[in-house]
Image: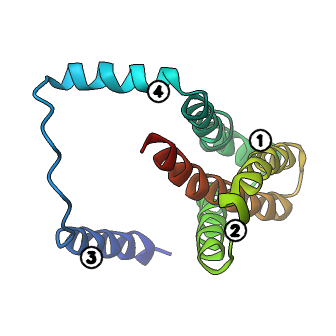
Amino acid sequence: VKWAFGLEVVLLVIAAAISTRLRVDKPIPTGKSVIGDLVDGLAFARKSPVILGLLFLALLPPTFLMGPTRVTSVFMVRDVWEESDKYIGFINGAFGLGVLAGSLALTTIRLRHRGVLLTGVSTVLGGVFFAAVGVTSMVWVALAFQGLLGLAAAIFINNSAPLLQEQAM
């Protein structure tokens, strides 16, 4: 898999080239400083329990699922599963495939109530899958659960960001 890094670089360059063609509206100047705008935004968010809840939910996956997975996978591969370092890449790849599958699945299914229930369930299941990765002694089972963790993370992130944007409008 020596070519994988080169492929990643090529895909990143293609993505960067495509993103240069995107056109976005210029922001409306508020007449305040950046700090003033941030203070106003925080004051607005503090008044809305929905936005505070969504922000809290948005902190859960990176804090309790994705971050610890990246740190602990190195130790799990070496000390628990007793595999070579290449399995660290396989673990991360399984997560990435799960994210891809979750994102593609969300493009094909129609969600009721803006996916609020699915978003909550994906957070709980993400924790279950994370725990399952931690307790298994077989690397192939861990790869499957890591893929499911990526799937849950994709569902959560792809649903919570639009909910947050919708509430901020």
Disc 4 marks which residue? 45
x and y, in percent, of residue 96 in the image: 59, 64
Kindly report which numbered mark, 1 or 2, lies closer to the viewer in this rendering: 2
Q: Nearer the viewer, residue 113 or 107?
A: 113
Q: What is the image's colouring? A: rainbow
Q: In this view, does 101 lie to the left or right of 27?
A: right
Neighbourhood count class around disc 2 (C-alpha, 10 Å): few under 14, some 14–19, many 20 upward: few
- Element assignment for label 4: helix
What amino acid does circle 4 point to? Ala
What amino acid does circle 1 point to? Asp
What amino acid does circle 2 point to? Leu
Disc 1 marks which residue? 79
How far is disc 3 from disc 4 in space, using C-alphas? 36 Å
Q: Earlier in the sequence, mark 4 or mark 2?
A: 4
Seen from this angle, which residue lies furthest bottom? Answer: 108
Kindly report which numbered mark, 1 or 3, lies closer to the viewer in this rendering: 3
Q: Which residue is drawn at 76% across and 49% down?
A: 126
Disc 2 marks which residue? 111
Disc 3 marks which residue? 14
How far is disc 1 from disc 2 in space, using C-alphas? 42 Å
Q: Residue at x 15, y 32 (%)?
A: 30
How far is disc 4 from disc 1 in space, using C-alphas? 44 Å
Kindly report which numbered mark, 4 or 1, lies closer to the viewer in this rendering: 4
* Circles 4 and 2: CB atoms closer than 8 Å: no
Q: Nearer the viewer, residue 6 or 57?
A: 57
x and y, in percent, of residue 51 in the image: 54, 34
x and y, in percent, of residue 122 in the image: 75, 53
Q: In this view, does 8 lie to the left or right of 47?
A: left
Q: Residue at x 81, y 45 (%)?
A: 124
In the image, residue 108 sits, relative to residue 35, either above or below, namely: below
